[in-house]
Image (cartoon, rainbow, N blue to C red):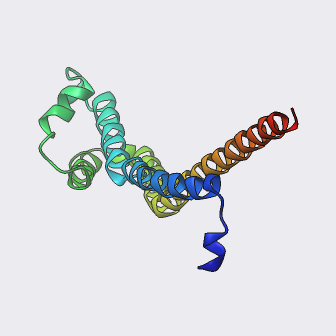
Amino acid sequence: MVQLMKLNGWQRLWIVVSVLLLLPTIYLSYITRPIKEPILNDWAGHIIELAVNHDPALSSYKPWEIAQDYRDIPPDQLVEKLLTKYGAKHPEFKLQVDSINNIYRSKLDQLTFSSWIHFIETLGIWIGLILLLYLIGVTISWVHQGFKNKSGAT
C-alpha cells in the first residue's frame, strides 16, 4: 500500500484508464469469439450444395431454396438430418461427403483452441493499447517538465 502512494498522477490515471479499458476489451472478446453455429451453417450449406449439384430430383432448386426449407432446424440437427437424408440416398458421393465432414469436424475440434487464441490476441491488443497510453503519458509528462524548467529559469 505504501508503494501505491508513491505513484504520480499520470501513473494513477494510467491505472484507472487501463482498468476501464479492460471491461470493453473483455466484452468485445466475448462477442467476437469463434462459435460453432457459423461452422455448422457452412457445413450444412456444403452438404445442400453437393445434394443440389448431384441429385436430379433437386436440379430445379437453388441451394438457398433448400436451406430455407430447413431454416427452423438448429444447425447441429440440420447437419445430421442432411447427412442422413442425402448421404444415404447417394452412396456414390460418400467420398465427397466424407471429405466435407472431415473438414468441418476438424474445424469444430479446433474451436476451443481457436477461442483461446482469440482471447490471447485480444489480451495482447489490450496490453499494447495500455502500454501506448503509458508511453503517451510519459511523453506528455516529459514535455510538461521541459516547460516547467524553462519557465523557472527565466
State the residue at coordinates (44%, 52%): 29
Image quadrant where one finds the N terminus: bottom right
Residue for point 45% across, 53% down: 20
Residue under the image location 56 percent in, 58 percent down = 15
Q: Is residue 40 left or right of residue 78?
A: right
User: In the picture, residue 140 is in which quadrant?
Assistant: top right
Of all residues, the one furthest to the bottom in this rendering is: 1
* Quadrant location, the C terminus: top right
68 vs 129, nearest the viewer: 129
Rendering coords of residue 66 (x, y %): 19, 32
Q: Residue at x 15, y 39 (%)?
A: 71
Task: Judge left or right: residue 150 versus residue 144.
Answer: right
Residue lying furthest right? 153
Q: Is residue 42 above or below residue 84?
A: above
Horizontal arrangement in the rendering, residue 3 relative to residue 25 (left or right): right
> Disc count in the image?
0
Q: Is residue 69 left or right of residue 38?
A: left
Q: Position of residue 95 (x, y in %)?
A: 45, 48
In the image, 130 versus 39, the foreground residue is 130
Q: Position of residue 142 (x, y in %)?
A: 78, 43
For this rendering, which residue is in front, 38 or 27?
27
The one of 145 and 110 positioned closer to us in this rendering: 145
Percent across and percent down for residue 34 are 42, 51
Image: 8 above or below 3: above
Taking the view exactly as shown, the residue that stands out farthest to the top is 60
Q: Quadrant of residue 51?
A: top left
